[in-house]
Amino acid sequence: MPNRINKAIELLEQDQVIFYTGGHTGADLTYEGGVEAAETYADYINVGMEHGSFDMTGLDDYMRGLVDGGPTASGHRTPAVIVEVPVDGASEDVVRANAWQLRQVLARGVHGILLCHAESPGAVRAFVESCRYPFQTIGVGVGLEQGRRGSAGQASASQIWGVSVDEYLDKADPWPLNPDGELMLGLKIENQRALVNAELSLRVPGISFAEWGPGDMSMSYGYKNSPSEPWPDELQAARERIRKACLESNVAFLEGMTAENAVEKIGEGVRISGTGRAGEEVTKVARAHMGRTMPV
């Protein structure tokens, strides 16, 4: 039996590499799409609403489909689901003004949120606080203020997680800030403005993972299209700065890998990756290298 609601967190606690599927420009947000996705070989599903539709009705249907199509082979009720939200982390004020997006998404019963263009520690703090209930006090006064998530969405979310409302309220808190939390909050540090503040942003309590967003970072440096690895010097330097900042702050580093470079990337500290065109092959290589025992 699984030890957690969130399969991705359970694996990260074991220092396993986790993989996601799903693009950055939307998903098949239907009930039938959820039923089919419940059998994914990935550990979590990325739902791209930064560029895809902000479709709460579709997300509702999709999450119900995941439940009805489950459980996973590992015994989890669903794969974890992390949503990229449309709001940018351009500033604290921008995040506060758009915190309604975070409330809407969390009420659908997802397991995490990814904030794009996280440019300042103030924006990151506003992000974390907007996703937390006021009665959760870990970290308050030590880098965070009181949470601002309101009451009501817990009823619908708890049904997706398969727990009581009270249990959902206890567990819907960011991990690893709260060791018993089941939410993953992530950052894309993907432009030069964000890069300047990378270390400070990643020290904000409540962040589970982060990536350097090579596509947007490349555009930030003047490239029309993202170069291929090996990266040009300025992009390699940006990647290294964010990778090291993640390791120093105990934040899981997300970066793409292939079957050919998976072992090298794992050695550098990559713990989250998309499968991309490599499909299941990269997951087989990485999972064998890490000695994973949890079923898919």
Image (cartoon, rainbow, N blue to C red):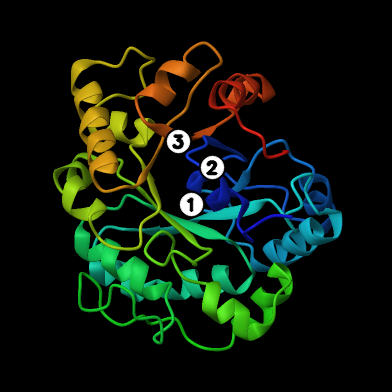
Q: Are marks 3 and 1 in contact (CB under 8 Å)?
A: no
User: As shown in the figure, which amino acid type bears the numbered disc 1?
Assistant: Glu
Quote the CA–CA distance across marks 1 and 2: 7 Å
User: As shown in the figure, which amino acid type bears the numbered disc 2?
Assistant: His
Between discs 3 and 1, the one toward the N terminus: 1
Residue 23 position within the rendered picture, expressed as x and y whole percent measured from the top left = 59, 39
According to the image, label 1 marks what residue? 50
Above or below for 261 versus 41: above
What is the secondary structure assignment of the residue under circle 1? Answer: loop
Crowding at dot 2, Cα within 10 Å, few <14 / some 14-19 / many 20+, comes out as: some
The quarter in which the N terminus is drawn is: bottom right
Crowding at dot 3, Cα within 10 Å, few <14 / some 14-19 / many 20+, comes out as: many
Q: Nearer the viewer, mark 3 or mark 1?
A: 3
Above or below for 284 versus 187: above
Residue 290 position within the rendered picture, expressed as x and y whole percent measured from the top left = 54, 27
User: As shown in the figure, which amino acid type bears the numbered disc 3?
Assistant: Arg
Residue 181 position within the rendered picture, expressed as x and y whole percent measured from the top left = 49, 66
* Residue displayed at 53% across by 52% down: 9
Lateral position of residue 217 relative to residue 23, left or right: left
According to the image, label 3 marks what residue? 271
Residue 48 appears in the figure: no
Residue 69 position within the rendered picture, expressed as x and y whole percent measured from the top left = 85, 54
Above or below for 150 versus 131: below
Lateral position of residue 22 relative to residue 251, left or right: right
Q: Are marks 1 and 2 in contact (CB under 8 Å)?
A: yes
According to the image, label 2 marks what residue? 24
What is the secondary structure assignment of the residue under circle 3? Answer: strand
Quote the CA–CA distance across marks 2 and 3: 19 Å
Q: Nearer the viewer, residue 231 or 284?
A: 284
Q: Nearer the viewer, residue 76 or 58?
A: 76
* Residue displayed at 73% across by 38% down: 295
